Image: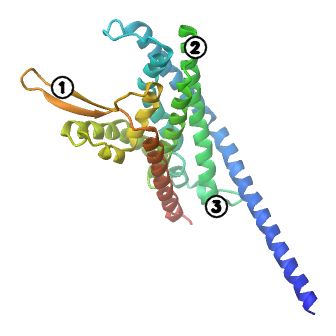
């Protein structure tokens, strides 16, 4: 009798383990299928963004090869300086636009087009969100890598070498784009539609997030004090370009204004490596947690 009960308990435990394995395989399969589907769905958008990055590269090429002398700027003297000029130029703008374009539809699309009721087989919002985040991050990473390849080829042709610091730069760029994607996903979790999410994201990232450090610098709040900059996540993106030639002093003070009425402007050029990594991870976590909570609570018509 006792032996029979033990055998039955063993069968139940084994059945439960089997169910868990099957469920885990199903979860991974649904996430994988979501990633594949989203990659195919956004393939045209990828081509458009690749063209955008190529255009930005070409514009940077013209600036570095023909316009620096006319503007009275010093031409790059090495591969690191050349690559830095490309990265700190128009690249941040392209990064913000592509991230907004890829991430704007992650959540908002379900509620603007009511696609949540058309999913078959039924997939949970959690797995759907994970799959979409992965696929859109891959697409944006491809665009970033494409731009860095073009910059590396240019440096190789002109100087016969590619400074190894470019690997640090692309690593920071890939981490920072996850911060941006998390932020756009957060906006998408409560916006009405994809277009409004993209427009709002670009406005916030290109204008608002760039104005805040400018205001902090002019107000004197950041004078000898880096702490306020940590509350502006766009500050962590500065390390993408500066990592190519990490400055000895990350803090500068300049005199501006007419003679006799000059005033000091304090500027933080970049966070250090530890601060940048920690800050980005914190913001990624915060944005994704809030995105998940809002997505779970948000209801489509008919649900």
Going 90% across and 91% down the picture, which residue do you hit?
2
Element on which disc 2 rests: loop
Which disc number belongs to residue 124?
Answer: 3
Numbered circles on residues, count: 3
**Residue that lies at the very extreme toward the left in this rendered image:** 260
Marks 3 and 1, the one that precedes in the sequence: 3
The residue at 54%/14% (across/down) is 155
Q: Which residue is mark 1?
A: 255
From the image, tell me which residue sits under label 2.
161
Residue 15 rendering spot, x and y as whole percentages:
84, 73
Label 3: how many Cα within 10 Å (few below 14, some 14–19, many 20+): some
Name which quarter of the figure residue 46 lies in: top right
Question: In what quadrant of the picture does the N terminus appear?
Answer: bottom right
Query: Disc 3 versus disc 1: distance between alpha carbons?
Result: 57 Å
| Residue 23 location (% of width, % of height) | 75, 63
- Give left or right: position of 2 versus 260: right
Earlier residue among tags 1 and 2: 2
Q: Secondary structure at mark 1?
A: strand
Residue 289 image point, x, y percent: 50, 58
């Amino acid at each position: 009798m006792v032996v029979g009960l033990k055998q039955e308990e063993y069968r139940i435990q084994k059945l439960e383990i089997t169910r868990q394995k099957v469920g885990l395989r199903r979860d991974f399969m649904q996430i994988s299928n979501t990633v594949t589907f989203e990659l195919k769905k956004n393939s045209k958008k990828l081509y458009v963004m690749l063209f955008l990055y190529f255009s930005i590269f070409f514009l940077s090429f013209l600036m570095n090869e023909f316009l620096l002398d006319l503007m009275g700027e010093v031409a790059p003297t090495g591969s690191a300086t050349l690559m830095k000029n490309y990265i700190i130029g128009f690249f941040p703008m392209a990064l913000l636009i592509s991230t907004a374009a890829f991430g704007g539809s992650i959540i908002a699309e379900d509620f603007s087009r009511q696609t949540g009721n058309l999913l078959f087989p039924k997939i949970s919002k959690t797995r759907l969100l994970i799959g979409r985040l992965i696929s859109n991050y891959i697409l944006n990473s491809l665009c970033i890598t494409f731009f860095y390849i073009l910059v590396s080829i240019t440096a190789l042709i002109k100087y016969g070498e590619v400074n190894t610091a470019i690997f640090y730069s692309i690593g920071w760029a890939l981490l920072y784009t996850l911060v941006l994607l998390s932020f756009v996903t957060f906006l998408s979790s409560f916006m009405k539609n994809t277009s409004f999410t993209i427009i709002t994201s670009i406005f916030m990232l290109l204008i608002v997030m760039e104005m805040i450090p400018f205001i902090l610098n002019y107000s004197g709040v950041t004078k000898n004090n880096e702490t306020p900059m940590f509350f502006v996540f766009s500050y962590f993106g500065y390390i993408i370009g500066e990592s190519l030639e990490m400055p000895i002093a990350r803090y500068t003070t300049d005199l501006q204004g007419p003679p006799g009425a000059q005033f000091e402007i304090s500027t933080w050029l970049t966070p250090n490596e530890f601060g940048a990594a920690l800050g980005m991870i914190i913001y990624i976590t915060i944005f994704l947690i809030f995105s998940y909570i809002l997505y779970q609570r948000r209801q489509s018509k008919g649900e």
